[in-house]
Amino acid sequence: MKKKLISILLAVVCLPMAAQVNVEASIDSMQILIGQQTRVTVTTTSRQDAKVVFPSYRPTEYITSGVEVLNMSDVQMKPIDNGMAHFVRVYTLTSFDDSLYYLPPFSVQVNGKEYKSKSLALKVLTVEVDTIHVEQFYGPREVQDNPFLWSEWSPLFWLSVMMLLLLTLCYYLYLRLRDNKPIISSIKLVKRLLPHQKAMKEIETIKAEKLVNSENSKEYYTKLTDTLRIYIEERYGFRAMEMTSGEIIERLMATPDQTALEELRQLFSTADLVKFAKYSTLINENDMNLVNAIDFINQTKQENVPVEEPKPQMSEEDQRSQKTRRVLRWTIIVLLSVTVLVLAYVIYGSYQLLS
């Protein structure tokens, strides 16, 4: 009696729950041509918190003999009233044999219990071929060449034209570079005279101009003292041309060459009197001062002085020519590099279009 009561209670409780689950299957088109596709939608109505498991098929797996499953969608849940929901999965089917197929019911598990949909039918039709009037059918065509499109080839054409122009410009610049004679650095050899040699050469000029016997003593002593000042400046390294006679003698007192200083002091004193006090000298006095100047130079001269090596010198025209050659050379290199890149691109683009 107790077992019957329990069974009745379970039936009363489970009956409403079972009534809440419903599995339906619908097909988009029951009739297709060979190779066409149709979709079967399986909808399970159950509570939202139910565990629903739809049948699963691999791609190209047969749902029944002659009907393949191409793919299936993910399960989508669409909530409805009273905590219920529709669980939907879509199956895409196809067939390559003309026949009428019976699609078995789709089995869905809800909370471990199996529920089935109704069965479906699918009719696959073939394409009728007129075997009587065969003249209206044509065999396979021969392989056709791709049509020539100017829009595809025009960029390569204009790049080729640009490449030819670049080559022409390179050749022109090469002719300019070839005709422009190379620069040869000219070396200007100037014999460097030592300070005492320059001074003695200037004194010889004074003698040649006969300024010793000239009545213009001021000009004679001016040239003579300027010659000595230049010699002292180059020999001892101080700016004697900007100093007075007394300052020059005072600076020379600090040098080891003091033998001829007294005669040099007398020469500068006489020269200052002539230039600033209009002092008139005698001819023998002029000769004596010239000899004193020569003695001072000979006693203080330096023979072994290192001579600087002559350096190549280029004229402004040679420098411009050298710069022009350098610019032409680099321009040719850059243009040739661009031409090679354009040529490589044209060859690659032509290969792509032809293949």
Image (cartoon, rainbow, N blue to C red):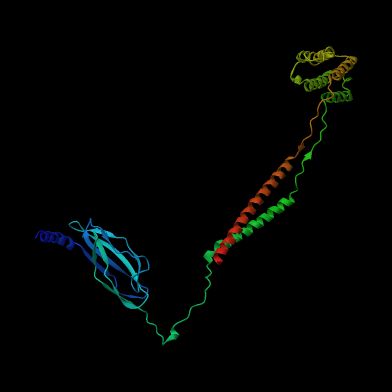
Q: Nearer the viewer, residue 278 or 98?
A: 98
Pinpoint residue 207: horizontal percent, then vertical percent.
88, 23
Relative to residue 143, is residue 253 drawn left or right? Answer: right
Residue 1 location (% of width, % of height): 9, 60
| Residue 221 appears in view | yes
**Which one is in front, 330 or 143?**
143
| Residue that lies at the very extreme toward the right in this rendered image | 284
Can you tell which quarter of the image residue 75 is in? bottom left
Q: Relative to the observer, which residue lies in front, 246 or 286?
A: 246
Q: Residue at x 33, y 78 (%)?
A: 99
Q: Position of residue 278 (x, y in %)?
A: 81, 14
Label count reads 0
Q: Is residue 101 above or below residue 193?
A: below
Q: Is residue 33 above or below residue 354?
A: below
Q: Residue at x 54, y 65 (%)?
A: 353
- Judged left or right of residue 352, residue 259 is right
Camera-side residue of 243 and 334:
334
- Left of 345 or right of it: where is 329? right
Residue at 55% x, 61% y: name it: 155
Q: Which quadrant is the C terminus positioned in?
A: bottom right
Q: Does 137 sit above or below residue 257?
A: below
Residue 278 seen in this snapshot: no
